Amino acid sequence: MSSNKIVLIPGDGIGPEITSVTLKVLEAAGAKIDWVERMAGESALAAEGEVLPQSTLDAIHEHGVALKGPCTTPVGKGFKSVNVQLRKAFELYAAVRPVRNLPGVETRYTGVDLIVIRENTESLYSGVEAEITPGVVTSTKVATEKGCTRIAEWAFNYARQRGRKKITAFHKANIMKLTDGLFLRCAEEVHKNYSDIEYDTAIIDAACMRMVQDPTQFDMLLLENLYGDVVSDLAAGLVGGLGVTPGANFGDERVIFEAVHGSAPDIAGQNKANPLALLMSGVMMLKHLAATMNDDSFANAAERIKAAYDACLQAGEKTGDLGGSLGTKEFADAIIARL
Ligand code: NAI
C-alpha cells in the first residue's frame, strides 16, 4: 500500500513500553509515519470487550502495514491467540525472523547469520482440537498443497532477492509421513525453479543438535508452523536472546512487523524490557516501506537507527537481558543520542 499511514498495536505486558520508545526512535531518525493506533489482546478485551476489535482489523485491511507489540494468550484456557487470529485473518503466511550476532553482544557463537522462514497459517496451529471422550483429546495437524507450496515459493524467492545461498527444510517426515511429507515434496518441487539456490533437508531433532553445535552451517531455514515457532526461539538464544530477534509476518497484500518475543508479564511495567527486537522489526518495516514506496528517506532512517543501536551496544549501553544496566527508556534515549 502506498501511504505512510501505519497501524500501531501496542499490545499487552511490555508491549506499550517498547512500542512507545520505538516510536520515539523512529521519529528521531526522521521516519515520516502517520500512526493509526488500534488495540488488540487483553488490553482490547478490557477496553472494548473483544480481543481483536473490528476497528483493528479494518485499519490493517485499509493501510496494509502494521507494527505490533506482543499480545498475551492465556495458557490452556481462554480466548484463541490474537496473533494466530491476525495471521489467519490476513493470510500472513510467511514469518521471517533474521537471527544475527550483534556487535557488543557476546554469545557462545560468532558469525551467526540465519534467516528463519516459518509457515504461519497451518500445522497444529490450525486449532482443530477435540475431546473425543473424557480423558482423550486430539489436535489435528493440517498441511495443504497450496499452503506448503506458497511458503516454499516465498522462501526461495526471498533467498534469491537477498542473495542467500542455501535453504534447509527441517521436518519429521520419517514419522509424520503425510503432513511433513507433503511439506517436503512441495519444497522440492518449487526448488526445481530455483537451481541457483542450494536446498537440503534435515530431520528436526538432529537439526536442533546441529544448530547448537555450529549454527553457522545453516543459511536459511524453512519450517512448518510449530517447528518454526520453537526453532525461532532456539535461534534467538544463539545470538543473545529474545530481546534481539525481530520478525515480520508477510501475506501477499499485508504485513505485520513484530518481535519474536511475547508480552513478558514477568517484567512488564518495570522499565526492564529490551525494546531492541521491536525496534529492529521497525527497521525491517522501514526497509519494506522504502522498497514498496520507492522512498529513500525510509531506507536512510533505517540505516541511521541500525548504526546508532550498533554503536550503543558496542559501547556497552544495553539493557539488563544483555548484561547492561540501562532501562527501556534510557536505552532508547542512548540510541537517539547517537542518531
Ligand atoms: P516471552 O517471550 O514473553 O518471555 C520469555 C522470557 O523472555 C521471559 O523471561 C521474558 O522476561 C523474557 N523476554 C521476552 N522479551 C523480552 C524483552 N524484550 N526484553 C527482555 N526480556 C524479554 O514468552 P512467554 O513468557 O512464553 O509468553 C508470555 C506471553 O506472551 C504469553 O501469553 C504468550 O502467549 C505471549 N506471546 C505472544 C507473542 C506475540 O504477540 N507475537 C509471541 C510469543 C508469546
Image: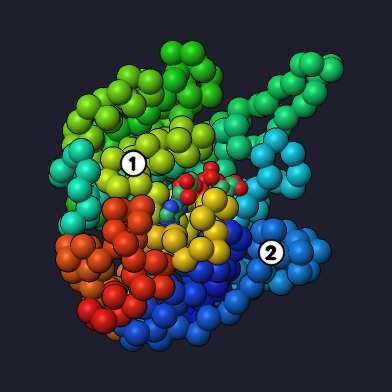
Query: Is ligand 1 less than 8 Å from the beta carbon at label 2?
Result: no
Q: Residue at x 69, y 64 (%)?
A: 43
Categorize mark 2 by other alpha carbons within 10 Å: few (<14), some (14-19), many (20+).
Answer: some
Q: Amino acid at mark 2?
A: Ser
Tag 1, which secondary structure? helix
Judge whether 228 appears above or below 46 on screen.
above
Percent across and percent down for residue 7 are: 55, 73
Marks 1/2: CA–CA distance: 29 Å
Quadrant in the picture for residue 215: top left
Residue pointed to by mark 1: 237
Q: At 27% from the left edge and 46% from the top edge, which residue is drawn?
A: 239
Image point 26% across, 81% down: which residue?
337
Q: Is residue 90 rendered to the left or right of residue 300?
A: right
Question: Within 10 Å of the Cα at label 1, are there few (<14), some (14-19), or many (20+) other Cα atoms?
Answer: some
Quarter holding residue 307? bottom left
Q: Nearer the viewer, residue 184 or 257?
A: 257
Q: Which residue is mark 2?
A: 43
Where is residue 248, by image quadrant? bottom left
Up-down: is 193 above or below 54?
above
Visible residue check, residue 46: yes
Residue 155 circle label: none
**Could you tell me which residue is drawn at 17 percent across and 66 percent down?**
315
> Picture coordinates of residue 267 (x, y %)?
51, 55
Q: Are marks 1 and 2 in contact (CB under 8 Å)?
A: no
Of the 4 image quadrants, the one containing the C terminus is bottom left
Q: Residue 197 at x, y = what percent?
A: 22, 40
